[in-house]
Amino acid sequence: MPTYSSKLTTIERHILAEQEQHPSASGDLTNLLYDIALAAKIISREVNRAGLADILGVAGNTNTSGDEVKRLDEYADKAIFRVMDHTGRLCAMASEEQEDLISIPERFATGKYVFLYDPLDGSSNIDANVSIGTIFSIHRKITYGARGTLEDALQPGHRQVAAGYVLYGPSTVMVYTTGHGVHGFTLDPTIGEFLLSHPNMKAPKQGAIYSTNEQGYWSWDPKVRAYVDWIKKDDKATRRPRSSRYIGSLVSDFHRNLLYGGIFFYPATAKNPDGKLRLLYELAPLAMIAEQAGGRAVDGRGNRILDLHPTGLHQRAPVFLGSEDDVREAEVFLRGEHPAQKT
Ligand code: P6P
């Protein structure tokens, strides 16, 4: 009888196996993660067809690709809502695309989880066929009553029950954590299954990549400038060589750094005094992933991202996240304590 070495694990089987480690689990979170995988397949199909929309013609789409991008954002937002709104697993949702908290329609039962998401981050890159992503964060309901409230959504990241992202690139990859490690799955579109491709992902302790938009350089805090000036100097006697890699699509930059090692940062700038990226549905989920993979995520103001208590659904925060040694190295500069800052 031949022995097969590679275990073929679908995301459904993996999530179920995780649930089995928690006998008291009701299965709601398991099913919620299935729902996300379904929404990811639906969005992946549409994103992969996007470039053909103008050629093939899409009902109602006769404008420039700018509208095509907006259409995709709205499509992804609606796809997630339609997969999630009637399952009875959620008490409320919040989306980057919607100003206010999204209630579960009265005709549907509600559940004990809050689902926060950026349906299609980086979508302005779609015209250039650059990878883009969905980011999600799941909290447990903390208020009484069936329907979720803003208080249920505005929880610090360390209370997340699960978090993850989907990267629509050369292949579609879904990465998630429920607090027991980080696991990545690659979609085989021919069978419509996410197959385990990155079990128990660990961020390299340090990397050779730094990712930031250096256009903001002159409006950064001088301590951030000192950090970048220092890592850019080619002096192998005193520092590790670094390369700049910046796609401008958060999930792409984050995923590459998670695999290869490195640091992503979006500091406060004159244009974005609190940074550009959103705390609730971008930074908190990626910070949970980073920490679960052995990395680190801070706001550059002395706080872990996961300890920040949000006061608004679309609140922004500065961020330094990725390999632990790289983030800690940046923090030394942000505290003004590096010898290079003494001259
Ligand atoms: P900038 C995309 O618009 C996005 O929200 C993230 O995906 C990305 O990391 C960031 O903005 C890029 O911002 O200012 O460099 O264009």
Image (cartoon, grey):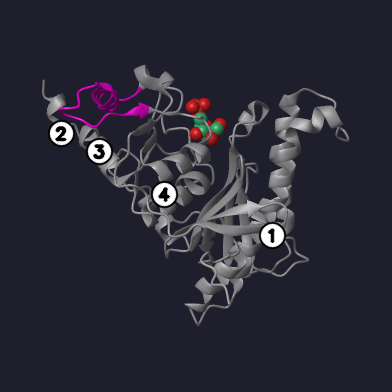
SS label for mark 4:
helix
Q: Residue furthest bottom?
A: 23
In the rendered structure, which amino acid carries the disc numbered 4?
A: Ala
State how far apart marks 4 and 3 are (Cα): 16 Å
State how far apart marks 1 and 2 are (Cα): 48 Å
Q: Is residue 229 magenta?
A: yes
Q: Is residue 207 left or right of residue 21?
A: left
In the rendered structure, which amino acid carries the disc numbered 3?
A: Glu
Q: Earlier in the sequence, mark 2 or mark 4?
A: 4
The answer to whether 48 is drawn above or below residue 239 in the figure is: below
State how far apart marks 1 and 4 are (Cα): 24 Å
SS label for mark 3:
helix
State how far apart marks 1 and 3 are (Cα): 39 Å
Residue 230, percent across and down?
23, 24
Range of magenta residues: 220-243
Q: Residues within 10 Å of mark 1 (few under 14, many from 20)?
A: many
Q: Which mark is residue 331?
A: 3
Q: Residue furthest top?
A: 218
Q: Which mark is residue 337?
A: 2
Residue 77 visible in the snapshot: no
* Residue on which disc 1 sits: 84
Residue placed most toward the observer, 174 or 179? 174
Q: Earlier in the sequence, mark 1 or mark 4?
A: 1
